[in-house]
Image (tube, rainbow, N blue to C red):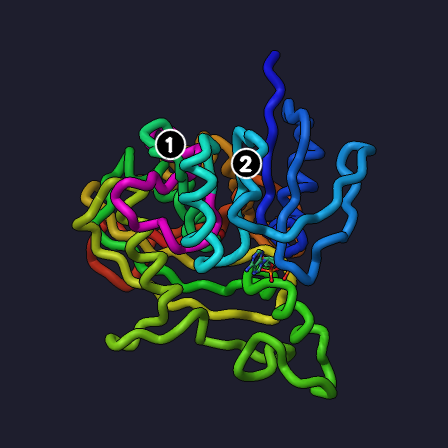
Amino acid sequence: MKKFKIAIVGATGLVGRTVLKVLEEKKLPFESYGLFASKKSAGTVFSILGKDYVVEELTENSFDRGFDFAIFSAGGETAKKYAPIAAKKGCIVVDNSSHFRMDKDVPLVVPEVNMEDAYKHKGIIANPNCSTIQAMLPLKALEDKYHIKRIIYSTYQAVSGAGKDALSDLANTDNSKPLKKFPYPIYNNCLPHIDIFMENGYSKEELKMINETRKILHRPDLKVTATTVRIPVSNSHSESINVEFEKDFVIEDLKNTLKNFPNLILVDDLSCNLYPMPINSNGHDEVFVGRVRRDESVNSRSQFMGCC
Ligand code: A2P
């Protein structure tokens, strides 16, 4: 079997380190790894499957070594400059930043949902926003069966999604240090402010959820709204999703539809207080869904709510 060479850009960041951990766990057929970050991290050593790799400063020449794949998680500006360089040198880039997500030449992919789009790439494949990704699994399952009319997202997002400086702000429980990431303390607080605010009053994070949902589900006309909030939990995003469908449903059938979707786990037994929580989903690849119920505030028989 051919063995591949992979570059990880942003290897020292929270996502980069998790990517390394997952690649190690999955034992994918990589012959070698190239680890890249900013100049300040050059020289850091990481061990992967028993072999030491030295982190290098990312430069325009970093992709001259014939990498087959590159996973970028180093922010939009880094992706904007270096992902096209890597792609030009024959590398398939998977970028975690928002920079290319809405580019019509860049597929935006959640493997369980629209894997077929990935094969249309021109060198760069985008990875959706973290709150969008997990919502796509239940929504795709339900879209195929009931056809979605409207989605209302409310999120409860973990601090790790904002990077390592954000986790340092969460650990600053006595306010003794200056904040590194957030405009206000996140410890003991909730911040209805993720990314920048736009002229229409939405945050950019909310617009990402709206636009990315439409692109991934191939529903440019879909009615979607979102309110995104950062909460003082280290890992694992939570969200409430209220959905209106074209078709009527029976709640048990709807639950079975969710249960049968790949990598989606229904945790929904109120008789023994079973529902999804970050302490249980942290570290898992699957999406956990629960509190599934009919929305009784509308006359329609086609609106449901759930959490994941
Ligand atoms: P570094 O650790 O050297 O700053 P996080 O999202 O957890 O803050 O991590 C961001 C990742 O992106 C880190 O690995 C960081 O490297 C990397 N990074 C940030 N800016 C650049 C840049 N200009 N060139 C290369 N890597 C960068």
Amino acid at pointer 1: Ala
| Mark 1 CB near ligand 1 (8 Å cut) | no
Please report the bounds of the magenta region as a residue range. 95-117
Task: Classify 214 as above or below 105.
Answer: below
Residue 175 percent coordinates (x, y): 70, 87
Amino acid at pointer 2: Asp
Residue hosting label 2 = 64
**Quarter assignment of residue 284:** top right
**Quarter assignment of residue 21:** top right
Q: Residues within 10 Å of mark 1 (few under 14, many from 20)?
A: some
Residue 232 percent coordinates (x, y): 61, 71
Task: Classify 299 as above or below 285.
Answer: below
Q: Tell me the residue at 62%/77% (across/down).
A: 180
The N terminus is located in which quarter?
top right
Q: Is residue 113 magenta?
A: yes
Q: Quadrant of ligand 1?
A: bottom right
- Mark 2 or mark 1, which has the lower sequence index? 2
Q: Tell me the residue at 36%/60% (across/down).
A: 153
Task: Classify 274 as above or below 29.
Answer: below
Residue hosting label 1 = 118
Residue 94 percent coordinates (x, y): 47, 40
Q: Tell me the residue at 27%/48% (across/down).
A: 214
